[in-house]
Amino acid sequence: MPSNPKRLLEDLKSLLGRNKVIEDEAIVRLYSREPSGLESPALAVVFPETTGDVSRLAKYAYSHDLRLFPQGSSTSLSGSAVPLDEGVVVTFEHMNRVREISVVDSITVVEPGVRIDELNLELAGKGYMFPVDPASSAVATVGGAINSGAGGMRSAKYGTMRDWVLGLEIVLPDEHGSVLRLGCRTLKCRQGYDLVRLIVGSEGTLAMVTEAVLKIAPLPEQVVVALAFYPELRDVAEAVVAVKEQGVQPYIMEFMDDRTVEAAAKTVEVSVEASGHMFLVGVDVNREAAERTASWLSRTLSSAGATRLYVAGTVNEAEERGFFTLRRSLLPAQMRVAREITGSPRTLVYIGDIAVPPSKLVDAVEELRSLEAKYGLFTMIGGHIGDGNLHPAVGLDPRNKEQARRVEEWYLEVMELALKLGGTISSEHGIGLLKREGLRREFQHLGSEKALELMKGLKRLFDPKGVLNPGKVV
Ligand SMILES: Cc1cc2nc3c(=O)[nH]c(=O)nc-3n(C[C@H](O)[C@H](O)[C@H](O)COP(=O)(O)OP(=O)(O)OC[C@H]3O[C@@H](n4cnc5c(N)ncnc54)[C@H](O)[C@@H]3O)c2cc1C
């Protein structure tokens, strides 16, 4: 870290232009936190507008040991986007153009600061979509989603970012601020080791992404959406199995437990009676099959024990009736309850991000509930249940040291539970600050401790001075 911050800020202003550097404390603070409540102040925020700006910044950081913290909209829930040391936040919000959409080539070329919903608005005009849709898609950026390896509600069918990134332009934090173009704009592409996939999910620790070539998919003709509520957690897991056993691969399969549903129903307005454990399923169909699918879904969900069931023939109808609003309010609802319980405005929410094989969901939800008694914590669970991705959450007041210790132990045991059931500690939110020990345990569980050494070696290769998002992942 340069010893003279004033001088550093002057340097950055002459490097990028005065209007691209903000040091006002109140504004900088807005870029220094995540919705989970994690925060740590940065020195300044810089707003590059071109790859050239990013390259100059990277070169300067290398030669002056300046810490850089790349950021999209800072909605990460793992601590991956908060600054740690006295460094500078690099926000990509001014690099936010959709440069190209080619339906013939099935691609779009975008700058990293494009928000996912904005991209999808443009694509919808051409009958296409970018399928990775984190529940934060109204603000989440493509650069942030690439670097956190994000998934979303449609992941049950379409997978995560690693399945949709074809090419990247990246800037390395080296003596030249080197700009590299990786991957291709064709669907098939072999370039030796797959560096594109290495960057996806690297959480801004290896390089800064300045452009991406993404695959796009046609919008489905119609999606039938069912919203069901169940009295027992076990019933939901069984409903998932019942749908999957029939060989259907739904477009959406989401879940919230009864506590989260209750809190969500108080947080947002919906036109259905929401109580019990929620299961939201969407199946994409052609128009002719819509009615048949709706009655098949109703039968299957009712047989699994649904006490309330609502079916919408289209996504628009489901949106109007608030089916998705309920699911999207998962985090705000969890935050609200956590604050009520701790009584502290500084409440942190620890959100797990485990995945288990869907066949193990029943065991996972039951064991999660039993951990609650062991640690004396009020747990709320939701997630993308179609791919076995669960987000159990608890709140804590960081001033209460004894509670903080219990939450940290709980968080580790949740990750251990996923490993025991053949799953993983982290599905889509990234490792960030919160899951570094979990990552170590996952490799230990697999007898592959050396993988961490390889990762540390890769970090040194890409970022020899350790200036890019230090303290995260490895
Ligand atoms: C309400 C809510 C719901 C959410 N739902 C989901 C969900 O359904 N699925 C899911 O996967 N996640 C979800 N998340 C987590 C998060 O929103 C997503 O991972 C999202 O993709 C992050 O986008 P962002 O622009 O906010 O990135 P940020 O949080 O700003 O950054 C994420 C990571 O990417 C790095 N980064 C950002 N831009 C660049 C760049 N250009 N170059 C290099 N590194 C960069 C950052 O350093 C950080 O490590 C949710 C979060 C919230 C608050």
Image: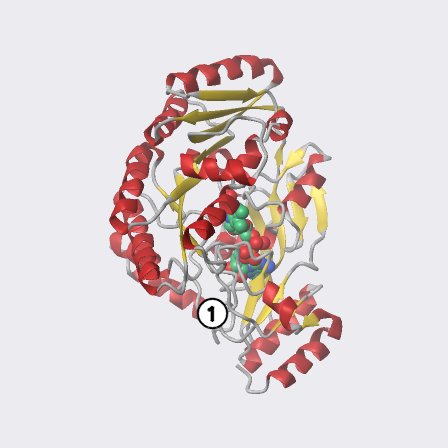
- Which quarter of the figure has residue 279? top left
Q: Residue at x 64, y 60 (%)?
A: 92
Q: Nearer the viewer, residue 341 or 453?
A: 341
Determine crowd level at label 1: few under 14, some 14-19, many 20+ residues with C-alpha closer than 10 A: many
Q: For residue 188, what is the image quadrant?
A: top right
Q: Establish if 99 lies above or below 65.
A: above
Q: Which residue is mark 1?
A: 470
The percent coordinates of residue 324 (x first, y second) are: 56, 34
Position of 54 with respect to 239 (left or right) is right
Residue 233 location (% of width, % of height): 35, 31
Of residues 307 and 367, which is closer to you in this image?
A: 307
Kindly identify the residue that appears in the image at 34 percent across and 28 percent down: 232
Closest to the observer, 160 or 331: 331
Seen at 34% across and 53% down, the residue is: 411
**Residue 181 in view in this figure:** no
For label 1, the SS is: loop
